[in-house]
Amino acid sequence: MSGEIDLEDDRVNMIPLIDCMFFLILFFMLVTKFTPDEKAIASLLPTDKGQMSAASSAKMDTEQVNIAIYPAGLDKGHQPSAYRDFVAKQYEDGTFDSAANLRIGGSPAVIIEGDPLRTKKVSSPAMKQQIAAFHQYVADQLLSREVQGKPRKEQHAVIISCFSGLSWKYAMLAYDSVRAYEATQQAGKINVKNYDLMEAREVSFSPPRIRNYNSNELGNELYEIVHLR
Amino acid sequence: MSRRRKPTGEFPGDGDVDLNPLIDVITMLIIFFILGGKFSQDVRVESITVPPTKTATKIEPETGWSRIVINVFGNTQVKKGSALMKIRIETKEWESKGIDDYTAYQKLRELLDKSYDRAEKFPDPKGTGMMLPKIVLEIRADADTQYRVVQEVQQIVTDSIDPFKNMMPKVHAGGAASARPFVNINFTSRIPGD
């Protein structure tokens, strides 16, 4: 009899321990996020061009390749006030920034949808398709503007002009496409170190043309970008 | 018979089943989840979704170079006139409550000035006379940040705009050599399918 009681007293009750363990597991399962490492695109900002000085530069240098990014649905030939009204309406019904036109020089624009590019999902077919479509377009266009016989850094500079109110993802897509094309021209070498970029073609972002969202300035900026050659 | 007691109603789960392996498995799972979540070295902000690109690569700073990550938040869909923008570097965070509120840019420039002064510098290989610091800046902007904001950050960083003077072009009293520009910029993005 006393032997049995000793056995009972020595037995540790395991169930609360297991409950605590389950609690901890649940906590860590909910809290842990498996995020992949973020990568980056290296760039070297030009020090010897207008970028370093004036805030806005409206130079239409024929020696450069312009990539214009503006809200989808805008086309050439309207007054600045018409563009301003179009965008104001989009702000109101919340469709602003949902799609953008990206255009190189004088060729027809490609429409890029915004939502696939901002999805938090790790990847989606729509996102890959958007990116592939634009990469193809830029590659074709840049190939047709290639200056034969010159090294990469003497090719025409690429300036990306994006409307100030549009989001960053469109401009990054344009930048990425130019870099991808340059990688094909350099036998697949993608510049990863900042000093390698000394030998690379110049690709830069045009500074925003307006500082205040005065409604007239918005229209003027759009007019200028839509009509970039 | 006295050793093997039948399980009673008071301890329903604690019968004659050996629980030790179960506890071992659970401990393994806990350790897996503790170690599996990545604790990165920088203070990464989880609420930024960077835009997707295909040419992004893992870039490690060169020897002798250091890196500063500038996190930029901002929303495009805000109504005009209330352009909210937020910049965070490590644990310091600055907000702009309106399009004419330059305090975030001012604080950013102050921090960059201090980092520039502390850093090792080398002359600009393009011969402009500017001294460039051995610091790589990483602009980690959310995909929905306004282009305007990202560009303004870029202009502040290259010291071509003065946030203390209403964002007018910066006048460098001592010429190019007195500027404090950062020209090595990385733009954070993710590869689709990563």
Image (spheres, coloured by chain):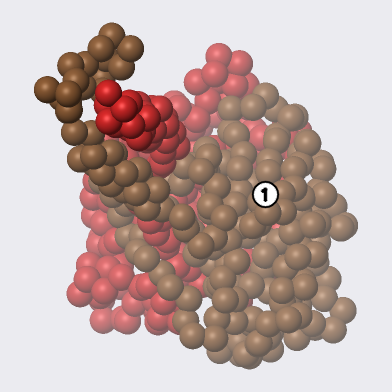
Which residue of the protein is positioned furthest toward the front in this rendering?
Answer: A1
Residue B127 visible within the image: yes
Q: Is residue A37 left or right of residue B126?
A: left
- Which chain: brown? B
Q: Which of B164 and B63 is in front in this view?
A: B63
Where is residue B83? Give x, y as percent: 70, 34
Q: Nearer the viewer, residue A96 or B97?
A: B97
Q: Which of A184 and B24 is in front in this view?
A: B24
Secondary structure under badge 1? strand
Q: Is residue A9 left or right of residue A48?
A: left
Residue A157 visible within the image: no
Where is residue A71? Give x, y as percent: 49, 32
**Residue shown at 35%/35% (left/top)?**
A10
Which residue of the protein is positioned furthest toward the left in this rendering?
Answer: B1
Where is residue B121? Give x, y as percent: 65, 87
Q: In this view, does B1 lie above or below B111?
A: above
Residue pointed to by mark 1: B87
For chain A, the rendered hue is red
Q: Which chain carries label 1?
A: B
Q: In this view, does B105 lie to the left or right of B65?
A: right
**Residue shown at 70%/35% (left/top)?**
B84
Q: In which quarter of the image is residue B42?
A: bottom right
Q: Is residue A124 above or below residue B91?
A: above
